[in-house]
């Protein structure tokens, strides 16, 4: 089993002092991965600028031009949460390009699975607007590339970030070529992702939203993956699985109120690996989304990589301080609307 990773120091250049989505998210992570001697066991994939033709399959040209203009003007805000500095446009192009290169590496057989350690994150970025710390939608660009240029017809995107990936959902809401599955704290930013949002037209039934109350922990998340994600993936039979890997559902994260642990993230990754092994020859590519406690983030990413490589999880932060709440009601609702009962 070979696991690839994408990283470039350029990702540290998108930064604003005092903002929670800061360069230290990656610098702390890379320091820990080096300390654990994990990097030398991984296949390195270069991050390069995404070709504009691939970016424009997801984003509107006028929005891309606006982001470029804001950065070239020295930076500014797309909204109250989402900033650019003078380097952010190029960094965001490189993040999307890194995800695209990881998809290439996995589909071309250079690695079995992998993780794009990139920023800024992407899953809130709408086709025509950046929001929620996100400039370009990295996972959506990767999925569109696999469908349009690698001969695939079915891609599963699983999103375990604390927040609903409204940008990813919107990009594929009316197609049956992408199955979008999301677990997220609800109601919470950005306010979307109710279980009744299932897609429209040809995409009806291909958005699977699992809105969660605060307090769900490892056991609840594992049940959701086993009882909802696994059967919908078996039914869909994707040829590639992409993951929006956000770690802000960790019990130590300052933005959320969930009870996942780093070990729990490892278990979710193991389930994703099992699904990928069963339905798409192990093809599994993750890209970094949220996660804002530096220690929780870096140890959870390490646990994810250890699981992808088939190793043992090291979790010095331990389990959540409070037991997780049950998820029986949401399991019933989601199973019912997606005919899993």
Image (cartoon, rainbow, N blue to C red):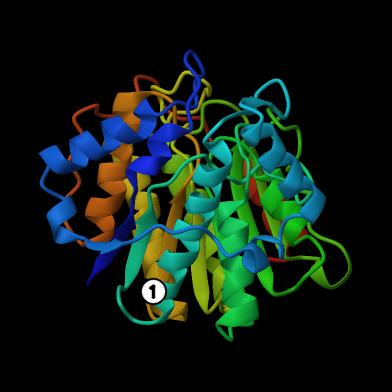
Q: Residue furthest top?
A: 18
Q: Quadrant of residue 6?
A: bottom left
Furthest residue to the bottom?
151
Residue 43 vertical placement versus 139 (above, below) = below
Quadrant placement of the N terminus: bottom left
Residue, disc 1: 106
From the top left corner, tell me how far across and down residue 196 is, in percent. Answer: 81, 49
- Rendered location of residue 62, percent (x, y): 81, 49
The image shows residue 256, relative to residue 160, as above or below, that is above
Q: Is residue 234 left or right of 11 when viewed as pictured?
A: right
Q: Residue at x 37, y 68 (%)?
A: 274
Q: Residue at x 55, y 75 (%)?
A: 234
Q: Position of residue 61 (x, y in %)?
A: 78, 55
Q: Residue at x 40, y 51 (%)?
A: 268
Q: Is residue 247 left or right of residue 42?
A: right
Q: Between residues 54 and 278, which one lies in front from this camera angle? A: 54
- Name the residue: 20% across, 36% down: 32
Query: Based on the displayed image, in which of its 4 quarters is residue 146 positioned?
Result: bottom right
Label 1, secondary structure: give it.
helix
């Amino acid at each position: 089993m070979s696991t690839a990773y994408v990283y470039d120091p350029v990702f540290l250049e998108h930064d604003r002092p005092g903002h929670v989505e800061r360069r230290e998210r990656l610098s702390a992570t890379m320091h820990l991965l080096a300390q654990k001697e994990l990097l030398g066991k991984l296949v390195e994939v270069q991050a390069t600028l995404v070709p504009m033709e691939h970016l424009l399959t997801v984003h509107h040209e006028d929005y891309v031009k606006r982001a470029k203009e804001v950065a070239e003007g020295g930076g500014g805000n797309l909204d109250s949460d989402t900033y650019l500095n003078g380097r952010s446009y190029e960094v965001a192009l490189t993040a999307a390009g890194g995800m695209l290169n990881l998809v290439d590496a996995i589909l071309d057989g250079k690695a079995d699975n992998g993780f794009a350690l990139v920023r800024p994150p992407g899953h809130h970025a709408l086709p025509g607007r950046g929001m929620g710390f996100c400039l370009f939608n990295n996972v959506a660009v990767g999925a569109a590339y696999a469908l349009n240029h690698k001969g695939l017809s079915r891609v599963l995107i699983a999103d375990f970030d604390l927040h609903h990936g409204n940008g990813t959902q919107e990009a594929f809401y009316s197609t049956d070529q992408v199955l979008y599955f999301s677990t997220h704290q609800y109601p919470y930013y950005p306010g979307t992702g109710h279980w009744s949002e299932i897609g429209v037209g040809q995409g009806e039934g291909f958005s699977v939203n699992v809105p969660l109350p605060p307090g769900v922990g490892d056991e609840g998340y594992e049940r959701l993956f086993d009882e909802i994600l696994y059967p919908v993936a078996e039914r869909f039979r994707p040829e590639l699985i992409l993951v929006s890997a956000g770690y802000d559902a960790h019990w130590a994260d300052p933005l959320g109120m969930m009870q996942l642990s780093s070990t729990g993230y490892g278990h979710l990754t193991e389930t994703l690996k099992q699904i990928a092994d069963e339905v798409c020859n192990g093809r599994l590519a993750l890209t970094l989304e949220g996660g804002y406690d530096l220690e929780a983030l870096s140890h959870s990413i390490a646990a994810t990589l250890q699981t992808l490589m088939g190793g043992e999880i090291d979790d010095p932060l331990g389990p959540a301080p409070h037991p997780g709440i049950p998820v029986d009601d949401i399991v019933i609702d989601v199973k019912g609307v997606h005919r899993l009962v």
